[in-house]
Amino acid sequence: MSKTKQKNDPAGSEESKEPDNFTPMASIIRKNVISTLGRPPELLDVVVRELWNDYYRINVLTGVNMIAARMTHSFFVSVNSVGDILKSEPTMTRVYA
């Protein structure tokens, strides 16, 4: 009997899931965050993690490299079905040109 998981195996389906940060919705939210905030100098990443339903945690990482990264901004946001930010805690405003 093979020890590899089959594609139709429900237990194996978890392994094939994309990480939250790389889903199409996360990409849309990432673009909306940068559009609202502006682009920080030395931007490394905008990490988008789904919490529940349409609520996400957003962390904006900046620095010269990942070793020297710092979390410049952090938000809890709710979004609609197309990824538009409806509410943000704290309030997201334009910071960068």
Image (cartoon, rainbow, N blue to C red):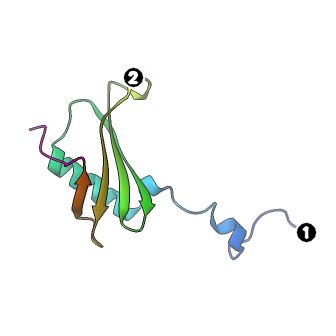
Instruction: Give the residue at x 44% y 58%.
Output: 51
Q: Quadrant of residue 2?
A: bottom right
Q: Residues within 10 Å of mark 2 (few under 14, many from 20)?
A: few
Can you give x and y, in whole percent of width and height, for residue 62 in the image? 31, 31
Mark 1 lies on residue:
1
Front tag of 1 and 2: 2
Give me the disc on residue 11.
none
Residue type at mark 1?
Answer: Met
Q: Which residues are magenta?
A: 90-97
User: Please, what is the dominant secondary structure of the magenta stretch?
Assistant: loop
Mark 2 lies on residue:
68
Can you give x and y, in whole percent of width and height, for residue 7 in the image? 68, 72
Query: 8 or 57, which lies in front?
Result: 57
Q: Is residue 85 above or below residue 63?
A: below
Residue type at mark 2?
Answer: Ala
Can you give x and y, in whole percent of width and height, for residue 41 in the image? 21, 30
| Residue 96 within the segment the image draws in magenta | yes
Instruction: Give the residue at x 84% y 62%.
Output: 3
Which image quarter holds the N terminus? bottom right
Q: CA distance from mark 1 to mark 2?
A: 48 Å
